[in-house]
Image: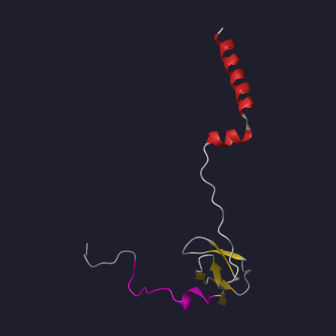
Amino acid sequence: MAGSAIRGSRVGAGPMGEAERGEAAPRFRVSYWCADGHESRPSFAVEAEVPETWDCPKCGLPASRDKDNPPAAPKIEPYKTHLAYVKERRNDTDGADILGEALAALKARKR
């Protein structure tokens, strides 16, 4: 095997250019600003619908087209355990009743 051979290519193969892919759709750029003041400028096709918000690629916060009033950062809730969700739905009295029913069912099964 030749040490200088380039695998997966052929002689005369070059990069794909516009002639082989066709013309690109006409585009325009839109500026979005996040709460940290970052500006991102994604490009959209002329006939595409431009979204109201865009995620900032630098910090991940939502960004809008209004530089003076960017959207606020979303409130991030801490991770909750299964027990925390159960405690939201049930109070201590309900928990005691359910525990009593489960214990009675276990005692009945043992007999």
Q: Residue at x 74, y 30 (%)?
A: 94
Q: Residue at x 69, y 83 (%)?
A: 68
Residue placed furthest toward the front: 92
Q: Give coordinates of residue 4: x percent, y percent.
A: 27, 79
Image quarter hosting the C terminus: top right
> Up-down: is 83 above or below 100?
below
Q: Which residue is drawn at 69% across and 75% down?
A: 53
Q: Which residue is drawn at 55% across and 72% down?
A: 59
Q: Give coordinates of residue 96: x percent, y percent.
A: 70, 26
Q: Is residue 12 left or right of residue 81?
A: left
Image quarter of residue 86:
top right
Front residue (pair 55, 22) = 55
> Up-down: is 10 above or below 73?
below
Image quarter of residue 46:
bottom right
Front residue (pair 13, 29) = 29
Which is the main secondary structure of the residues drawn in magenta?
Answer: loop
Specify the segment rendered in magenta: 9-24
Asked if residue 97 lies in the magenta stretch, the reply is no
Q: Give coordinates of residue 7: x percent, y percent.
A: 36, 75
